[in-house]
């Protein structure tokens, strides 16, 4: 047996080894060109982003204008969907998130079994069908909790199935007889048919007739649970004025009612949350035409102004003939799609003053600065700050949506509507301690801090809460 010679030059051996190391490292560190092309993330722009926004909107995770720009709102929508789908909420629309979204749209086979405390895109599919068929009155969250459990049992009873709240093969088989979320291609076909129907209607109805119908007296009023094309018209108008952050679906749901309540409070109307003839007339007569302008403040950027007024940087540049992203303090900026919003200052008053009129047992509306979503609360206790509880299960659901589907101690800037006053505040999102309302699906209370309020545990101010109060106080109402 011959021995292998060990005379290979060491220098050449090390050079070859080093070359192999470099090639391997390059292959490992270089991004996969297919993956990079398929992934969408913050800063991307184009038709793919607009399609993603539309798909998220269909499932209730994106409630803004479809701009085609992957900004903070799109990233937040992706994060909320990822959390609901039990994925890491990194805000990147990657391979796993794409697969989960296809599942949620009903393109993949349903699982054999779903039950309470499950979560994921399959739960979104289930909730979508239950919502469409009237068994569930909250938007899909991907979380199988008590409301979904009760809705499944109601569905099972009506279809003569065992009403145990568990979605097994028999329940799925019955559910499949109803409409699942439309795929993107199916939605395109629906949009085409809708466009054709609208074009036919336009031939027999002039624009003047439409405007006259909008500003005329309503023959009937609308309240929660009603579904009507005129409700969609009101939603669109309330969105233009900055009161309504939800979808234009023609359904008088929870967010629609709260938008009407806020509009009524700030416009001297009877605050009953009902869309009656007087509210309708005021809504469509006030500022129905014209163009918004905004005066640039020190430190403003086009991106910040676009975010505030729910538009895009490109639209701002086009309407103002701006080539640069630099703004001069005091410069008047025209806002596309003008709605002549009436703005109101948000008071940054101290806790002692708030405590004097926000008495125990009084209700208020809280609006989240970042999402625009609102919910009602009742003050129940608290001496150094307000301890409050969501008023109903629907208010709890809205609060959970603000926190991305799960409770958290994170602080968030909010505006509290107490009577006709708008007050800067900060909340946390964690149920804790005692409670007085037992049918709201919220096990405890949460804290609302105002300027100079303090923590009960140590009698000290919380720096993050106080910062959020300042953030909320820097806004104008409606919050954009």
Image (cartoon, rainbow, N blue to C red):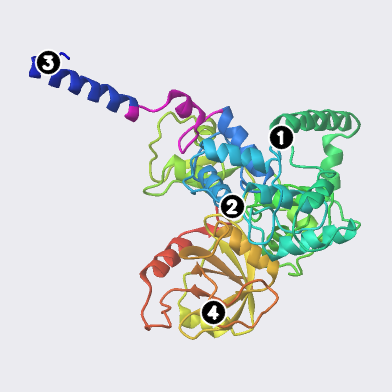
Do the numbered discs 1 and 3 sit on residues whose CB atoms are within 8 Å?
A: no
Observer able to see residue 437: yes
Of label 2 and label 1, which has the lower sequence position?
2
Whole-Å distance between the Cαs marked 4 and 3?
75 Å
Task: Estimate how packed mark 2 is, as few (under 14), some (14 to 19) or many (20 or more) residues with alpha carbons within 10 Å.
Answer: many
Residue at horizontal 45 percent and vertical 40 percent from the top: 302
The quadrant the N terminus occupies is top left
Can you identify the residue that label 3 sits on?
12
Q: Secondary structure at mark 3?
A: helix
Residue 45 vertical placement versus 72 (above, below): above
Q: Residue pushed farthest front?
A: 1
* Residue 293 vs residue 35, the one in the foreground: 35
> Which residue carries the number 4 mark?
387
Residue 84 badge: 2
For marks 1 and 3, give the CA distance: 59 Å
The alpha-carbon separation of the residues under discs 1 and 4 comes to 44 Å
**Dot 1 corresponds to which residue?**
183
Check residue 420 for magenta coloring.
Answer: no
> How many residues crowd mark 3 within 10 Å: few (<14), some (14–19), many (20+)?
few
Frontmost of labels 4 and 3 is 3
Which of the two discs, 1 and 4, labels the residue nearer the N terminus? 1
- Residue bounds of the magenta highlight: 28-46
Neighbour class for label 1 at 10 Å: few (<14), some, many (≥20)?
A: some
Residue 446 pos. (x, y %) = 54, 74
């Amino acid at each position: 047996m011959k021995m292998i010679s060990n005379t290979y030059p060491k220098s050449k051996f090390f050079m070859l080894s080093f070359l192999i190391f470099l090639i391997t490292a390059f292959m490992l560190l270089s991004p996969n060109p297919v993956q990079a092309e398929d992934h969408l993330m913050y800063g991307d722009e184009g038709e793919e982003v607009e399609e993603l926004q539309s798909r998220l909107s269909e499932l209730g995770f994106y409630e803004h204008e479809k701009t085609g720009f992957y900004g903070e709102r799109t990233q937040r929508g992706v994060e909320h969907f990822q959390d609901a789908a039990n994925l890491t909420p990194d805000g990147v629309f990657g391979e796993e998130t794409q697969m989960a979204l296809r599942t949620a749209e009903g393109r993949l086979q349903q699982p054999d079994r779903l039950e309470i405390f499950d979560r994921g895109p399959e739960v979104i599919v289930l909730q979508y069908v239950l919502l469409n068929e009237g068994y569930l009155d909250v938007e899909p969250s991907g979380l199988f909790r008590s409301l979904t459990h009760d809705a499944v049992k109601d569905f099972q009873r009506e279809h003569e199935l065992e009403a145990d709240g568990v979605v097994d093969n028999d329940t799925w088989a019955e559910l499949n007889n109803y409409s699942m979320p439309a795929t993107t291609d199916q939605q395109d076909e629906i949009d085409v048919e809708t466009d054709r129907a609208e074009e036919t209607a336009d031939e027999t109805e002039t624009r003047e007739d439409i405007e006259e119908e909008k500003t005329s007296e309503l023959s009937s009023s609308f309240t929660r649970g009603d579904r009507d094309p005129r409700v969609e018209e009101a939603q669109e108008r309330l969105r233009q004025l900055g009161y309504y952050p939800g979808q234009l679906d023609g359904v008088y749901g929870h967010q629609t009612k709260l938008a009407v309540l806020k509009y009524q409070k700030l416009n001297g109307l009877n605050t009953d949350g009902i869309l009656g003839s007087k509210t309708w007339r005021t809504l469509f007569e006030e500022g129905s035409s014209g163009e918004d302008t905004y005066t640039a403040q020190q430190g403003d950027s086009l991106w910040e102004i676009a975010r505030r007024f729910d538009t895009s940087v490109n639209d701002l540049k086009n309407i103002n003939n701006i080539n640069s992203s630099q703004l001069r303090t005091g410069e008047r900026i025209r806002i596309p799609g003008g709605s002549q919003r009436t703005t109101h200052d948000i008071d940054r008053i101290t806790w002692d003053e708030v405590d004097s009129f926000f008495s125990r047992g009084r209700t208020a509306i809280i609006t989240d600065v970042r999402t625009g979503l609102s919910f009602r609360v009742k003050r129940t206790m608290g001496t150094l700050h307000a301890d409050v509880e969501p008023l109903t299960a629907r208010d709890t659901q809205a609060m959970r949506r603000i926190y991305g589907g799960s409770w958290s101690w994170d602080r968030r800037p909010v505006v509290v509507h107490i009577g006709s006053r708008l007050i800067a505040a900060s909340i946390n999102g964690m149920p804790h301690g005692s409670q007085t309302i037992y049918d709201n699906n919220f096990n405890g209370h949460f804290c609302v801090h105002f300027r100079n309020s303090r923590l009960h545990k140590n009698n000290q101010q919380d720096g993050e809460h106080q910062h959020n109060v300042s953030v909320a106080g820097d806004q104008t109402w409606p919050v954009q």
